[in-house]
Structure formats: C-alpha cells, structure tokens
Image (cartoon, rainbow, N blue to C red):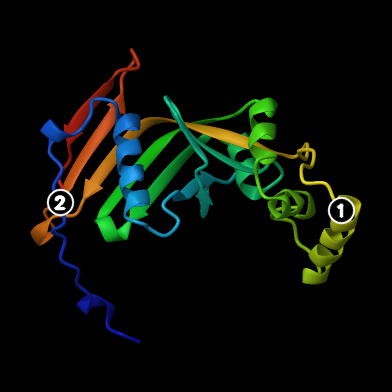
Amino acid sequence: MAKLHGLRENYELGEMLESNVLPDPIEQFKIWMNDAIEHKQKEPNAMVLSTTTENGTPSSRVVLVKEIDPNGIIFYTNYNSDKAVHIKHSPIVALNFNWLDLQRQVRMEGSVEKIDAERATTYFQSRPKSSQIGAWVSEQSKIITGRGILEQSKKALDEQYQGVEVLPKPPHWGGYKVIPNMIEFWQGRRSRLHDRLRYTKKEDDSWQLVRVSP
C-alpha cells in the first residue's frame, strides 16, 4: 500500500473572497453546481447525506440531488429506507458536496421535510422506465436472501407493464427537502491556507457571512 502521509495535492485553481460571492448562499451554490456541470465533473449532483440513528450513531451515504429551489435541496428515496427511518426520528441532517477537479467543497446543515406527493409523482414519472421499475422492486435497506429475489421481481414487473412507459408512483417512494441553516463554501488554496466562507441563517431568515480559518 502507498504511504498515505506522503500524498500531496497543490491547490491553486482559484480563490474565494467575501467581495465575489452572492449574499444568498443557495444562489451561490447554484453557481458552483453549474460550474461543476460545465467542467464535466462526474456525478456533479452527488452529495454525502449524514443522518443520525435512534441511538445517536452517525450514518452516511451518497445520494443524488435532483432539484434546487429557493430555500432547499431536494432528493428522492424510499420512505422505508434506513435514511428515511433516521430522518423520521431526527429530521436534522448534514450534506457534503466535493468537486475534486475544481478543488471545492460545500457543507450544509439543516432540517428536512417531505415534499408533496404530486411533486414527487411528477419527478418519478419523468424517470426512465427502468428506474421506475427499480423503485417498485427494491425494498431499500431490507435484508434479502440473494440477488435472484430482485431479478424475479423485476421480471414480473417488466411483464406486467410491458408496453407501458409511465408507472404509478409507489406509495413508499417520495422526496425530501433539506432546508439549510448553515452553508459553508471551501476553496482550496496554496500552503493549505484554504478559503472557507460560512453562511448562517439568522432569525429573520437573512444570512450572516463570516470567514472561517482553514
């Protein structure tokens, strides 16, 4: 195995100053997301979602952001999954976006709420048919005896919906909106003196911007 302590990466692609960011961090986040897309980052909308179990154990996994609206980040999942069970118990989460080629990272913390079923259905039925069927097949996070269980269920649904491109949304499937109260932008800089700008939501819903030492 390579010696990890010897790995080094020089960060010198950009800078981030208080004078060149927007007052609204959601709008600033959209700019960085667009930059990641334009620079052809692999899965630019991938984020690490961290939740908390009932006994206080942190739990993380990668999910994909599918929408950004003026006050939140939206993703979709099975409402019976482990992450959904955690959210039901404690609707406070942390998010992390990492765009290595741009030497950028964004952290968010905030509360979570379900989106309405109509909005979830619209998105669900816009997905490829194979993804729609996959949502019906998978009892996400449940123990199964083997992959054959999934293949059998998929085959049955393929036959049931042969010639049909739009399936009904499963009742156990939908979306969540993360409403951040903290968003921190990180831009790599030389000598590990990185730029970190943190927005914190105030009681009047405006945002306070501060610089944080790297």
**What is the quadrant of the N terminus in the image?**
bottom left
The reply to whether residue 58 is in sight is no
Q: Of the residues shown, which amino acid type is indicated by label 2?
A: Gly
Instruction: Tell me which residue sits at (24%, 36%) in the image.
Output: 198
**Is 128 left or right of 170, judged from the image as shown?**
left
In the image, residue 180 above or below residue 166? above
Quadrant hosting residue 203: top left
Name the spot of residue 209 as percent of width and height, x first: 21, 29
Check the image and name the residue furthest to the bottom.
1
Q: Residue at x 66, y 33 (%)?
A: 122
Q: Identify the element where label 2 is drawn.
A: loop
Check whether the beta carbons of the residues at disc 2 and disc 1 lie within 8 A of each other: no
Q: Residue at x 73, y 50 (%)?
A: 129
Local crowd size for mark 1, using a 10 Å CA cut-off: few (<14), some (14–19), many (≥20)? few
Residue placed under numbered mark 2 in the picture:
14
Taking 108 as reference, is 135 left or right?
A: right
Instruction: Kindly tell me whether residue 50 is visible in this rendering.
Output: yes
Q: Residue beneath label 1, please?
A: 162
